[in-house]
Image: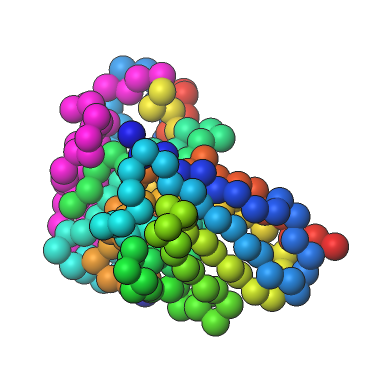
Amino acid sequence: QVQLQESGPGLVKPSETLSLTCTVSGDSISGYYWSWIRQAPGKGLEWIAYIYYKGDTDYNPSLKSRVIISVDTSKNQFSLRLSSVTAADTAVYYCARGHHDFWPWGQGTLVTVSS
Amino acid sequence: EIVLTQSPGTLSLSPGERATLSCRASQSVSSNYLAWYRQKRGQAPRVLIYGASSRATGIPDRFSGSGSGTDFTLTIRRLEPEDFAVYYCQQYGSSPRTFGGGTKVEIK
């Protein structure tokens, strides 16, 4: 079955750029939409963005000015870049399949913003 | 942006009891595009219900969803030990996709 795995630095300094990659295994990334969702410690879920394998995107307006989502079909991966991070961006970042409901999800990766 | 308000914040019940969770939207959810998730501690959420009332693949029939427009309900017919967790509703009828604040179902 399809599995997703997030990877990237667990610690990012304030004002720098957070970069994460989601590697999809067990199925092709083609034909689907893919999303990033985050969850601050002890808080609820926030959808960040989605991308279609052909490159169509949609972003949460609250983050749109700082976010880029991209896809690499040759590597079966998609990625997230979030610029000018602050402590408020500290969260577990999940990748997931879909742009309506989301399933499956990766296990999540904690990214802490701190100097 | 559609704001989803879940109630109650915490539900204290015993195994075997029935749980009723509410999700209210600030405006009508297009085509009843509403999903429910269960998140166990330390895990990613798992979709239970989509389209307000359709069970996702592999989800047992003790879970049911209902509602339309702005008012939606998730019912768990008989709570199993693994059901003590946090539940989120999420709408995908419009952008941005939004989640409710969650309902924690705890053991009484």
**Residue A80 point in image, percent of width and height:** 54, 64
Q: Please tell me which residue is depicted at 33% across the width and 23% down the height of the picture.
A: B79
B45 with respect to A114 (left or right): left
Instruction: Inspect the magenta stretch and tell me whether residue B102 lies in it.
Output: no
Q: Is residue A101 visible?
A: yes
**Splitting the image into 4 quarters, where does residue A99 fall?**
bottom left
**Residue A75 point in image, percent of width and height:** 46, 54
**Splitting the image into 4 quarters, where does residue A85 fall?**
bottom right
Instruction: Say which of A80 and A63 sits in front.
Output: A80
**Residue A101 point in image, percent of width and height:** 30, 53
**Residue B48 point in image, percent of width and height:** 28, 39
Instruction: Say which of A98 and B91 sits in front.
Output: A98
User: Is A63 drawn above or below residue B107 in the view shown?
Assistant: below
> Where, quadrant-wise, is the C terminus of chain A in this rendering?
bottom right
Question: What's the magenta region?
Answer: B52-81
Q: Please tell me which residue is depicted at 33% across the width and 43% down the height of the picture.
A: A27
User: Is B89 drawn above or below residue B97 in the view shown?
Assistant: above
User: Is B64 drawn above or below residue B91 in the view shown?
Assistant: above
B31 with respect to A30 (left or right): left
